[in-house]
Amino acid sequence: DSGRPLTPALAGAGGAGGDAAARGGGSVAPRVRPKTRRSLELSDGSVVIAAITSCTNTSNPAVMVGAGLLAKKAVERGLTVPDYVKTSLAPGSRVVTDYLEQAGLLPYLEALKFHVVGYGCTTCIGNSGALREDVARRIEEENLVVAAVLSGNRNFEGRINPLVKANYLASPPLVVAYAIAGRIDVDLTRDPVGYDPNGRPVYLREIWPSQDEIHEVINQFLKPELFVDQYSRVFDGDERWRSLPVPEGDLYAWDPNSTYIQNPPYFDDMPLEAPPLRDITGARVLALLGDSVTTDHISPAGSIQKAGPAGRYLIERGVEPLEFNTYGSRRGNHEVMVRGTFANIRLRNRLAPGTEGGWTRHLPSGEQMSIYDAAMRYQQEGVPLLVIAGREYGTGSSRDWAAKGTALLGVRAVLAQSFERIHRSNLIGMGVLPLQFREGESAETLGLDGTETYEIRGIEGIRPRSEVEVIARRDDGSEVRFKAVARLDTPVEVEYYSNGGILQTVLRKMLRG
């Protein structure tokens, strides 16, 4: 229990008391909360991350000023943020900091622990950082479903923080409000957002700024000169940036010891002429997935787990877990990214029932291992790979690494009931064939469990949206034969696929002059 149950009587009386106070009269006494908040008042529904993040909302001065005014009124009423809530303010521009400072609102945000942490991608790409150690321990020990509230535009599974299972998108003022409340399971139209030092309830309507208040601040403090001043110095950087050594020469000097940037293998041993297309034979299923598998499930952008393949790779190269950073920050290193492909902590692969995360079974041995380790073993054995999925495969962010990592794992084709448009295109761009079940068919209706050996016929003469034959052979010798649609929708996409991808297509055209 959170320590402050919200009974119907309390909600009703508090609401009436608030309305009477707003009218300047009334005899209803506000209820007094007898308890003070404990430092680790955690339970299911607790908010442990509240972040005003850089993208989308912070370019809107109305909501940023609104957040500042709400913070000001909250502080003036004596409200605080529970210490288990990790807060952050990451404006998209230094101009935001300037007008919040000049309006006198930044100190109130800071009083509620919303300090400026930087001007770039933060929580909504998984850069929130670790939770406090005692908070993380409580969540893990009690298997709590805790929440994050952020003003960004991404809240995919496993992305914000590996310990936070419920992630909600909200406006900056509501991020501040939920940080004060410390819980997500409150009705802020009826329940108090918090209690003042005397234990009296404070309601959101009492501290929510009016449009007139917001416009008054904007008209007074948001001036064109702020933008001119900041953007005249936008490329200067700080002393650390200016002191970086700059290598000479026209070509990038690859550092073999770098864990951030490595030379990708896309053009290794690439012949001038593309080899002819061949049917796929002897393929195994790397992952058997359900519906709505997002690009975050395929290629997570958030934290790197030290026990996973990417974490082991970094530790072997002397990188301490504290310095892992995120997948998003290391996307210049294919060795990290391929190890993170299908490594989302919320991924459920039906080939490894009872597991969550990037696990699969190597076939025919039946050994359970990470998807990366299994893929590398299949590559050593010369076995091509498939991924089988349900509807809306690749939905979400149009992340190129979801296709790059898939290709580098050795996946030759993805067979799904339907594809998200951009991810389908990205798969083709990396030389991976998107195949779609016929309408009404799926892995379930065809009785496929992913343990079969697969053959795909009809690739050699492939045309836009032509059908191929898929043969799934079971260990007992029985077969399932069915047709699938090759989702190469245009002649250009056929050309990309025939060349092994868009990069190879472009390079071959350049080499031919």
Image: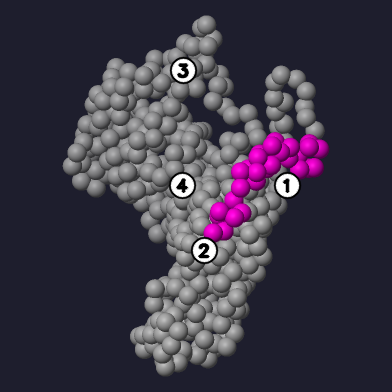
Task: Give the percent coordinates (x, y) of residue 63.
Answer: 50, 57
Please tell me whether the stretch drawn in magenta is mainly helix, strand or loop. Answer: helix
Q: Secondary structure at mark 3?
A: helix
Q: Name the residue that disc number 4 marks.
A: 296
Report x, y in % for residue 281.
35, 28
Q: Residues within 10 Å of mark 2 (few under 14, many from 20)?
A: few
Q: Is residue 510 above or below residue 77?
A: above
For marks 1 and 4, give the one nearer the viewer: 4
Of 238 and 265, the residue lying toward us: 238
Residue 407 relative to residue 293: left or right: right
Q: Residues within 10 Å of mark 3 (few under 14, many from 20)?
A: some
The residue that label 3 is drawn on is: 505
In this view, the residue in front, 297 or 399, is 399
Q: Which of the marked residues, 3 or 2, is nearer the chain's N terminus?
A: 2
Q: Earlier in the sequence, mark 1 or mark 4?
A: 4
Residue bearing mark 1: 318
